[in-house]
Image: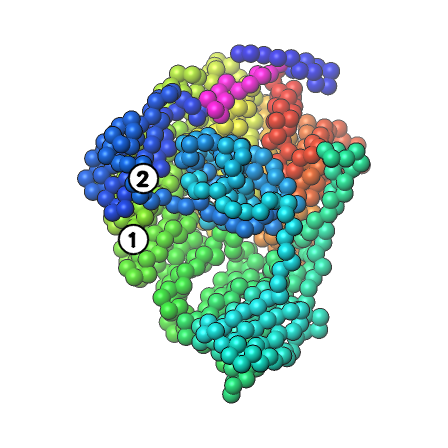
Amino acid sequence: MALMQFLWGGSQILFAAEPILSEAQFREHIYRMNVQPHWLPDETAFWYHVRTGADISEYVLVNAETGTRKSGETLQSLGISETTETRTSTLPRTTDRKTGHTGAPCRITFLNVLKSPVSLYWINSSGERIFYRTVASNDSLVQNTFEGHVWLLIEDGKKRLCTVKIDPFMSRILIDGAPESLPEDNEAQPRPAPRSGISPDGTWQARADEAQIVLTNLMTNEKVDLPAALQAGARYFGEIRWNRQSDAFVISATVPVQKRQVSIVETSPQDQVEPKTIKFDYVKPGDPLPQPAPVQFHLVDGQFQQQEIENALFPNQFTSGNTQDYRWSEDGSEFYFDYNQRGHQCYRILAVNANTGAVRSVVEETSPTFIDYQLKSWRHWGQADKTLLWLSERDGWCHLWRYDVSGSTPPQQLTSGNWVVRKVLAVDDTAGTIWFTASGLRPEEDPYHVHLCRVQDDGTGFQQLTTGDGDHDIQFSPGRKYFLDTWSRIDCPPVTELRRTDNGRLICEVERADISSWLAMGGNLPERFVAKGRDGKTDIYGVIFKPSNFNPEKKYPIVENVYAGPHAAFAPRKFGELKKRQDLAEQGFIVVQADGMGTNFRGKAFHDVCWKNLKDAGFPDRIAWIKAAASTRPWMDLSRVGIYGGSAGGQSAMRALLDHADFYHVAVADCGCHDNRMDKIWWNEQWMGWPVDESYKQSSNVEDADRLQGQLLLIVGELDHNVDPASTYQVVAALQRARKSFSFMPIMNTGHGAAETEFGVRLRQKFLIEHLRP
């Protein structure tokens, strides 16, 4: 192993200059892994291109009806012309030029089927391009991001392909499109025109500006002001939404609320000597929020009049802006909108009668803890808006429900059991079929493994359509007659199967990834491990990473990678999700990661542990899990345990040395949201509730800084727009007041995730090596 010396705090630290296997080597030495189908027009067959060796690839044609496969060096050898029309999904595009907001974390797979590499740039809230990674031709990579973030894709370093705004239901982005004709990123954007809306029948145009609506009869060009009783200081916001009958419309009005602004300093700008002060909107827990309310006008005796609407069912909304999203019924008799009560303990879909202004609940969810509205407020309006499909955890597990929109019959539960619906992929209203993914279906299998299922919209015909013991990615054929099922585990390379969508019948195995070359180069698979959590009953699942030169006769320090955000689960499940953890293991550590109570996808009771209790972070479960693993693995040294994490994981990493210093000895906390009062509103009020109360103080690392024991390294990016960097600075101040010894490294010209920069990664490694490795 190539070694180098590094001077740290007066001592010389030996560590591996490079990981045993780089990410490029990992990708280059695994074959037959990625299958991107190109379907022929009649959907009876598809072809794909796959790497079969170091410098070898082939084209494969699969008959979808018989499962027979034919391979060749070129498309022409398969009887397919390069001009033959094939069907793939198109690259999503957006007109957004910069990231406007940060939502829930997402993991997106970018799959590049072009002949050139594609570079990924994140466009931050200031419109600046920040390079992340490059996707090689006919390759894929997984990128962690957030809902609402905007990414720019550039082919071959120069050809702009598109900008993509991340949707929370995205999982895979196929890069197969042509470049779009867009203005330069820095081009000044025109001021938006006043909101206006033309009625579906073309008779009326309503224009809203500030607190005034002007209605124009486009047949006569006659204009009239529409007076409305608005709250003092209220203005109109958003789009005007007409019903199909053109006799009523609705728009939002609210009193604008001044948003809090955060100021950060760019100390070392590249274009000038003097530092820059950067200000941006950043709403924090407890801040005032706008309260948009619908204002509706309807046609009465030839004139449009305001319809008074009672707000008793939407008195205190949690909103991110000044507008609501309105939907009219097919017959125009009522419109619908969502109400998410502040504190996230009540969520409603409301219906407003267009003629009377009466408001009723179509759907009402309540919880004594919280409603996970970000992941579990999916809905699908049925034909003519008579029915509504909805996700609910009201029985303790996330399941599908069917509502009669009129309310004349009670809602019907379509799926049930001690498992969770994860994501609805498609709904066929004509056939009444719903395709969705779910996890926890089989007691003998990892409860986080995602499988494809189907059910009819009357609750009959439930069927699990995938069978492999692993996590499943689904690609439907264009007409949804077939699907490709690619499944894998962290310790099992991908297998791709072709199946029928109506019953899940296996037609053929398409590909099985070949990792023999990778293993021969020294690659090793991580180990899955299950042990009981804090209650002695609940299984906790995680992964153990060993160095590729592992020697069972040695004793290795343990390093835990922690991220316990309640919005998801984080221990890797799929093959290939190992790069950063394995790199750290190569430095002479046993790296572990597990999901304790308080994280998502294991049912409501498991999830609710986080409620007003983010400092818990599943520590009692994960400590029990690590101890159980070490009890049968003498090479795991419980006398030398470290932990590291970023963002919410940074909060948890420091918390380990505040509450569990008898177990953890070293921590690296990157860009931590160390005090939930200082972090963004949407994430923290979701789990900690509203109003801001004593529970926020009880979970604060700032408040408990005087309890620090062990070795702590704090890292922060000075340009962090995700977590206010003052959250870390305030921890530093509290530690200094308490006269605690610790290490602190701000990283210049860097935003969120500073420890994942090249400098940050090596800094983290050096700190862990110095304090854990003999």
Quadrant (top left/top right/bottom left/bottom right) for the C terminus: top right
Residue at image point 33% right, 32% down: 49
Mark closer to the chain start, 2 or 1: 2
Residue that extends furthest to the left in the rendered view of this protein = 66
Relative image position of residue 689 (x, y in whole percent): 61, 55
Q: Position of residue 381 (x, y in %)?
A: 40, 63
**Real-space Cα distance between discs 2 and 1?**
41 Å
Question: Which element is circle 2 on?
Answer: loop
| Residue 103 appears in view | no
Mark 1 lies on a secondary structure that is loop
- Is residue 23 one of those drawn in magenta? yes
Amino acid under disc 2: Thr
Q: Position of residue 431 (x, y in %)?
A: 28, 59
> Amino acid type of disc 1?
Phe
Which segment is the magenta one? 14-25
Is 716 located above or below residue 397 in the figure?
above
Is 197 on the left or on the right of 382, as rendered? right
In which image quadrant can residue 665 be found?
Answer: top right
- Decide: few, some or many residues near mark 1? Use Cα within 10 Å; few <14, some 14-19, many ≥20: some
Left or right relative to 599: residue 481: left
Q: Looking at the image, is 499 positioned above or below residue 543?
A: below
Q: Residues within 10 Å of mark 2 (few under 14, many from 20)?
A: few
Q: According to the image, label 1 marks what residue? A: 462
Q: In this figure, which residue is indicated by the disc labeled 2? A: 83
Residue at image location 54% in from the left, 84% down from the top: 303
